[in-house]
Image (cartoon, rainbow, N blue to C red):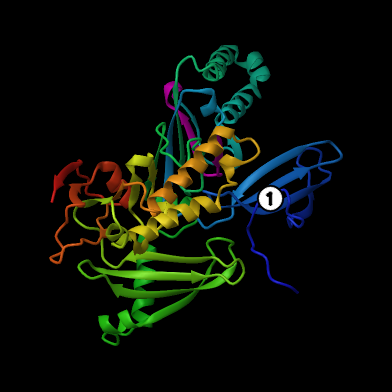
Amino acid sequence: MGNPKPLFRDLNADDPEPETTEIESLCMNCHSNGITRILLTKIPFYKELVLMSFSCEECGYQNNEIQSGAAIAEKGVRFTLKVNTPRDLNRQVVKSDYTSIKIIELDFEVPAKSQKGEVTTIEGVIDRSVSALEQDQPARREQHPEVAVQIDKFINKLRYLKDLETSFTFVLEDISGNSFIENPNAPAIDEQCSVQYFIRNNEQNKELGILDTDEVKSKEENAILHSIPEGEFTLEDLEGEVLQFPTNCPNCGSACQTNMKMTNIPHFKEVVIMATNCDVCGSKTNEVKSGSGIEEKGLKIEVDINSKDDFSRDLLKSETCHLQIPQLQFEVGPNALGGRFTTVEGLIAAIKDQLGDHKQSLIFGDSSQPESKQRFEEFLKKLDNILEGNLAVTLILDDPAGNSYIQSLRDDNEPDDSLRITHYDRSVEQNEELGIADMKTENYESS
């Protein structure tokens, strides 16, 4: 039968077999039979998607819809974008069914589940909102003329937003975590857009069809109690055991196996290492999760990379850790690289590999600007210069949970001249991101 193909593949115009599924389905406009086409694909820098397109030959009705093909994200996500330029209006937006949209200056909100998921732009969101408000205006003008006049005024305000005489704030919030706003300056920092992840409450979990937190904990505790009798395994036994369980490939969605092992990092703490190998697409991933709880304070680690010794430092980037390279104006959140136990050199190489794998991404498609491609290529060259030792930079790990680590070159494990460690009280936003109820104000203290 030949080699199996990934379930979710990169969208490629040259793909001879895009594996589009066609289903005969009812047209909701004329009630004749039309055709729904379904395509499973991936958006680089984002995730797997299910694209659906319906068309009816009888009446010409068409409808496009997008749904996430990935599992519901562990956290919800909130994007806050300051729209200043026409380029901002043209930023591509991926929104799910559970996405709510706000325009702060107009006190305007599109509630979650009021629109289907779609791939659009900021301007497209405004146009769709205008069309929705205009739809019933003829009836309102006859039945409620005063209300119709007020809505006409508000529609004009929405249209004026596209003139950009003044900037406005666009907030996209998705409890499923499956939405996205394009960064036209990628891989550099997006100065106009902030991204915040948050822990869902029980009501939001129920809306997504997820068990309550208490129910999940109860099931997990019962499963552990039944599967591992008390006293049967010591910590040394667990550290020497490699556990294997079935999962899905994070790259193509195919069935595969994940190996999991607990180990101890000298001068630090226990961690859980998870390795997944996919025989279908060849993807290999290694992820590290903390074996302990959230620390009392957040942790910020800065290391100057000036020599080969600095490249060889052991490094643990936890799944809650933000990463920055100030000299390159580069910053990524915890979801970009996940948890990793590697070296400084290995982490920078992983950044380069991940960016290099997605050169033909959402922001570098047919509609991308030449300067964007050039900026991206220049960034990859700078990463090469760092790895070759020709460009000195500072690597910053900022972990609100305090579970990240960079090795010191001193025998007593105290910070050396190139290593700086700072402990700090978490901000309200960071506590929300970690799901902690006890909120503290941010206050940095050097260790």
| Image height of 398 relative to 7, above or below | above
Magenta region: which residues?
Answer: 92-107
Which residue occupies the foreground of this view, 371 or 66?
Answer: 371
Q: State left or right for residue 447 relative to residue 259.
A: left
Residue 102 within the magenta-colored segment of the rendering: yes
Res 345 → quadrant:
bottom left
- Quadrant housing the N terminus: bottom right
Residue drawn at point x = 46 percent, y = 23 percent:
84
Place of residue 189 in the rendered image (x, y in percent of width and height, measured from the top left): 41, 38
Q: State left or right for residue 5 relative to residue 340.
A: right
Q: Residue furthest bottom?
A: 232
Residue drawn at point x = 33 percent, y = 58 percent:
344
Place of residue 291 in the rendered image (x, y in percent of width and height, measured from the top left): 29, 68
| Image height of 90 relative to 316, above or below | above
Q: Which residue is mark 1?
A: 12
Which residue occupies the foreground of this view, 10 or 57?
Answer: 10
Residue type of the residue flagged with mark 1: Asn
Place of residue 41 in the rendered image (x, y in percent of width and height, measured from the top left): 64, 53
Residue 285 seen in the figure: yes
Residue 116 seen in the figure: no
